[in-house]
Amino acid sequence: MYYRACLILLVLLPFSAAAATKYVSDELRITLRTGQGNQFEILKTLTSGTKLEILQETDSGYTRVLLEDGTEGWVRTQYLIDEPIAADKLATAQNRLAKTREKLDQAQAELKTLRSEKSELDSAYGQLKTEHSTATKELQNLNELASRPKQLAQENIELRKQFEQLSDELNLTKQENQVLKDRSKRNWFLAGAGVVILGMLIGLIIPKLRFKKKSGWEY
């Protein structure tokens, strides 16, 4: 029973480690071989930071791995680490920083555009506010005019009465002026007639006076 349990554990152990991922450490280069030992054929030379998928770990100091291109082989366990090397981390960080800066530049450009649009909207809002104020005043005036039609009608009637009164006064003034003109003409006519009559009387009286004087001289 004990041996059967051990056998099951040995069978399941490779499968439990199959999902793990490790990286070649900061060593310059390591070899990928067909077996566990230096006597086996070298398949590839792996550089630092190479990503490896762990297939099987053993107590012999070797680990069976799978490369991203599908190559499978054995490498020394001591050269494997659980995280990428510092150079890869730095490259990843720099890449993220570059993307962050790109997003920041894009965000700043969008912010500048939004500020420009905000300025235009503020200007348009000010103009609309002024137009709204003017329209409100005009509407208020119209409402005031519409709210007093009787007053306007009464004012119109009074204006008509004043116009008729002024028209009557004007006609009366014209009539009086005509009467004055007629009176002046008549006075001038009477004055002329008086002068003529006076002349005639003088013409009649003077000869008689001369005749009386002559008669007086004869006595």
Image: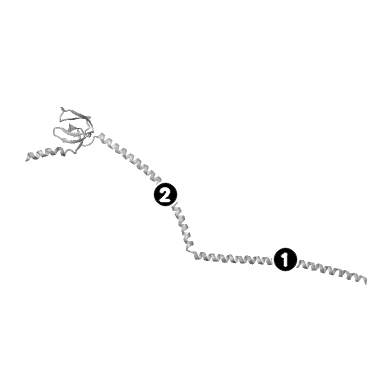
Residue reaching furthest to the bottom: 219
Position of 40 relative to 13 (above/below)? above
Mark 1 — residue? 185
Q: Is residue 216 left or right of residue 104?
A: right
Q: Is residue 206 left or right of residue 96?
A: right
Proximity of marks 1 and 2: CB atoms separated by less than 8 Å: no
Q: Position of residue 148 (x, y in %)?
A: 49, 64
Q: Nearer the viewer, mark 1 or mark 2?
A: 1
Return the mark for residue 122.
Answer: 2
Q: Is residue 51 left or right of residue 178?
A: left
Residue 93: name its quadrant.
top left
SS for dot 1: helix
Q: CA distance from mark 1 to mark 2?
A: 81 Å
The quadrant in which the N terminus is found is: top left
Q: Position of residue 5 (x, y in %)?
A: 9, 40
| Residue type (three-letter) at the residue carrying disc 2 | Asp
**Residue sitting nearer the eye, 65 or 83:** 65
Q: Position of residue 157 (x, y in %)?
A: 54, 66
Residue reaching furthest to the top: 39
The quadrant in which the C terminus is found is: bottom right
Residue occupying image coordinates x 72% and y 66%: 185
| Residue type (three-letter) at the residue carrying disc 1 | Lys
Residue occupying image coordinates x 15% and y 38%: 15
**Residue sitting nearer the eye, 116 or 7:** 7
Q: Earlier in the sequence, mark 1 or mark 2?
A: 2
Residue 60: name its quadrant.
top left
Residue occupying image coordinates x 59% and y 66%: 164
Residue 29: name its quadrant.
top left
Residue occupying image coordinates x 42% and y 49%: 122
The colour scheme applied to this rendered structure is one colour
Residue reaching furthest to the left: 1
